[in-house]
Amino acid sequence: MRALCWHGKSDVRVDDVPDPQIQDARDAIVKVTATAICGSDLHLYDGYVPSMQSGDVLGHEFMGEVVEVGSSAGDLKVGDRVVVPFTISCGECFFCRKGLFSACERSNPNAAMAAELWGHSPAGLFGYSHLLGGYPGGQAEFVRVPFADIGPIKVPDGLPDDKVLFLSDIFPTGWMAAEMCDIQRGDTIAVWGCGPVGQFAIRSAFMLGAERVFAIDRVAERLTLAGAAGAETIDFTREDVYDRLQQATGGRGPDACIDAVGTEAHAGGSFDAVLDKVKAATFLGTDRPHVLRQAITCCRNGGTVSIVGVYGGLLDKVPMGSAVNRGLTLRMGQRPVSRYMRPLLERIENGEIDPSFLITHKLQLSDGPDAYKTFRDKQDGCIKVVMTP
């Protein structure tokens, strides 16, 4: 079969790789009908995630048709349309029973490697390094889905792929970002990053009762899309974010701030951002946490900072003194996607949101190498790429 494979920094190719096979009774094989490039995939593309190996199949946002099932794959049957969560979860361990599917104790065969870096291992992920299991991803014609009796959610025939594909990751991610803010009706929320996750965080914040949402980015197309959802936009290259938010809130600050950017934050020519880039380029640092610093200092006393942007290592010069002395709550984590898929599917079915608003580029899998570069470089108005094998 054909698949998009990683071969080094900024080097993604379409390769012929072996077709996946059933390896366990709980497995299913899914023929991919739609797959997307996620902002998190760019961290792989840019070489920020360790333990990638040449030839690894990429992709963790995908859906498709079940074409083969193991003997213990639950009620899945050949012909079912399913969306597959990017977190791989057994459904039986201590954490899965608590609904913390992204912390599954059984799904990462390389748990010891992850624990050496982070202290404990999270769940395995599709297409996201050997640190997180080495599972072949969904930017391919077919995928083996472990624990298929737990993860995939069946999709009603009346809903096209474009409306439900993002249940695999970014819609639950944006929803969780807003949910962690504990939004009260009338609250003001600030969202850093108007990429795909930020766009869903903005809309989720409004659905959960926020009165005002500020959207912070530098890309005109992203700010326009955020503004169409009702957000008040801030181009951080044209005005000071802290000053604008304080002025807009009477000097108090937003009730909650969402970091939807993570490790590769851009911040114009600010000193801390320049220092972050130098450290990352010279291997003296692992992440560029400018947005996290700014979110902490902008948030009101007693407010919440919600972190769903991906961080991988050790962060430098994070203002913990500000967070501690002003009583901030910091909430963060990988998404336990399975917890959110069905409730969010119901919102799609009820017409509360049509996630296809996000798609700017619909391409073939063979276009993937160029699409990665276009998405990374924010060219051609690219906000979200969806590919069909």
Image (tube, helix red, strand yellow):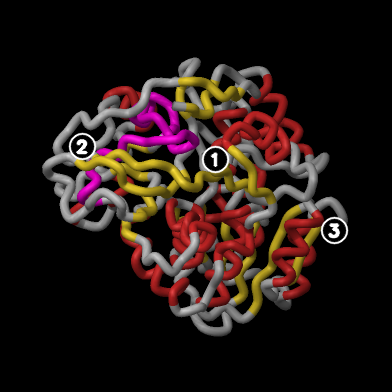
Disc 3 or disc 2, which is closer to the eye?
2
Q: Is residue 60 left or right of residue 281?
A: left
**What is the distance, in whole Å, between disc 2 and disc 1 at their CAs?**
23 Å
- Mark 2 residue type: Arg
Q: Position of residue 233 (x, y in %)?
A: 76, 66
The residue pinned by badge 1 equals 40
Could you tell me what secondary structure mostly forms the magenta stretch?
loop
Circle 1 crowding by C-alpha within 10 Å: few under 14, some 14–19, many from 20: some
Q: Is residue 123 left or right of residue 11?
A: left
- Mark 3 residue type: Glu
Q: Is residue 48 magenta?
A: no
Q: Position of residue 78 (x, y in %)?
A: 26, 49
* Residue 281 seen in this snapshot: yes
Provide the secondary structure element on which disc 2 rests. Answer: loop
Q: Which residues are magenta?
A: 127-150
**Residue located at (57% from left, 43% from top):** 387
The residue pinned by badge 2 equals 106
- Mark 1 residue type: Ser
Provide the secondary structure element on which disc 3 rests. Answer: loop
**What is the distance, in whole Å, between disc 3 and disc 2 at their CAs?**
47 Å
Circle 3 crowding by C-alpha within 10 Å: few under 14, some 14–19, many from 20: few
**What is the distance, in whole Å, between disc 1 and disc 3 at their CAs?**
27 Å
Where 46 sits versus 83, above or below? above
The residue pinned by badge 3 equals 239
Earlier residue among tags 1 and 3: 1
* Residue 293 seen in this snapshot: no
Marks 1 & 3, CB-CB < 8 Å contact: no
Q: Position of residue 93 (x, y in %)?
A: 16, 46
